[in-house]
Amino acid sequence: MALATLAGTTLEWYDFFLYGTSAALIFNKQFFPSLSPTVGTLAAFGTFAVGFIARPIGGLVFGHFGDRIGRKATLVVSLVMMGLASTLIGVIPNYASIGFWAPVLLVTVRIVQGVGLGGEGAGATLMSMEHAPPNKQNLYAGFPQMGTPAGLVLANTVFLVFSTQLSEQAFTSWGWRVPFLLSFVLVAIGLAIRLRVTESPSFTRVLAEADVVKFPLTESLKVGFSRLSLTLLAVVANSAVAYVFMVFALAYGTQRLGYGKNFLVLNVTVAAILWLATIPLWTAYADRHGRRAMFVIGSVAILAWCVAFFPLLNTGNSALAVLAFLGMGVIIPVTHCVQGSIIADTFPTHVRYSGTSLILQLGAILGGGLTPIIATALLNATDSSMGVTWYLAGICGVSLGGGVALFRRYPDTLTQHPHRPTGPTADPAVSVQ
């Protein structure tokens, strides 16, 4: 089960990250050639952000049906949506061919991508976590989280292969499309794996006990505004930092610092391999010793490394640039690997998909989707990376404070909820031990 969810999330994140890399390095020339390099990059990042804005729609729709008809069916649909959308990106004519309609079509398909991924994130984590044996909830919930760096490694590896084996002219002209077209084959493989997955035992019990509610999202909000908002604040920084490191740094490093495109993509890829490899270690530690302290320590480490990241890049020294990226690869997974179980911990089983999707996708918008645009705007306004550094440090500080307040105010649990809260639903008296 855990490996099946990992395979599905890897393929979905491959599609999503392939778009991010292309937005940073290719799309400004293909879809916004009449704009200056800076404005074109902002426009390309704008289409990247559209996918994040669409993710809550997917989260709400898939969360609703995931809590009413089951996790498995919704995950199958989300995988198909993402694969078809990515394949279509590979055949969209560029601006030189159809003018204004090229970016319009790109944004439209990007919205479909966002809706598909919005249904995937929470659902895959819940499927794996709800199949977990006792005392291994964090480990199992971490497998779908591994799909994030695994998808990034796959996307960047394919991107590097084509960008290095083809001439610059060939790659810019048509070569960048091939990785998107490969999505069709990869999704077919993922679909074959996902169709063999059994339904979540927790949701099967919900059905057996006739515990399905008509409007699960509304019911999920009854855990209270305080707990919802603190959970959202706690997880927002990880997304923000990750997308600066994975997407914005590519554009910044090539346009402002003169690093080679392939050098930066390779650095992100190696860092993502570290991210992927360390998740099982961190989740196993969380199962043995608890995720609270680990999450707080990880939040402090992310804050500290954000302060160091751009000064290291700005030296122009390749070795220090490698160090900057590798540090991200080691630190980001500390909080990323358990954030899914922390969010799921907020909601009872019968509304968990809807509630988790809401928090996860709002966090992705606030932290990830807008960050490359904000970072680019800050860089242009100040002509320095210092504004980006302080922006990230501020978000990390907010998340650290949110996490500490969340853990102090609410009791920790092992994501083993009854179907409904056992106490009053008003915040903060919810008890889901």
Image (spheres, helix red, strand yellow):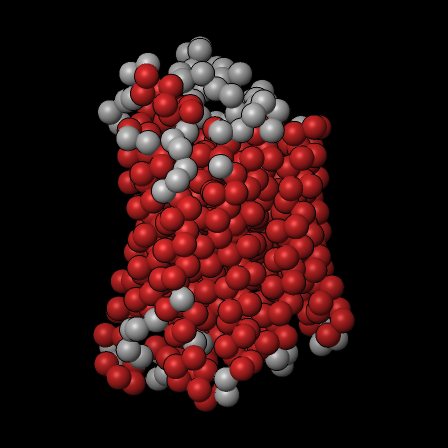
> Which residue corresponds to the image point at 44% horizontal and 10% vertical from the top-left?
423
What count of labels does the image hold? 0
Could you say where residue 323 lies in the image, as x and y percent from the top left? 74, 64
In terms of depth relative to the viewer, which is nearer, 37 or 99?
Answer: 99
The residue nearer to you, when weighing 247 against 385, is: 247
Residue 353 spot, x, y in % from top left: 39, 33
Dividing the picture into quadrants, the one containing residue 73 is top left
Q: In this view, does 396 lie above or below 247?
A: above
Residue 330 placement (x, y as % from top left): 69, 52
Q: Position of residue 371 (x, y in %)?
A: 49, 58
Residue 410 location, quadrant = top right
Q: Nearer the viewer, residue 41 or 171?
A: 171
Which residue is rendered at x = 42% and y = 23% of the image?
202
Above-or-below relation of 321 to 300: below
Q: Is residue 100 visible?
A: yes
Farthest top residue in view: 423
Left/right of residue 70 with respect to residue 339 in the rendered view: left
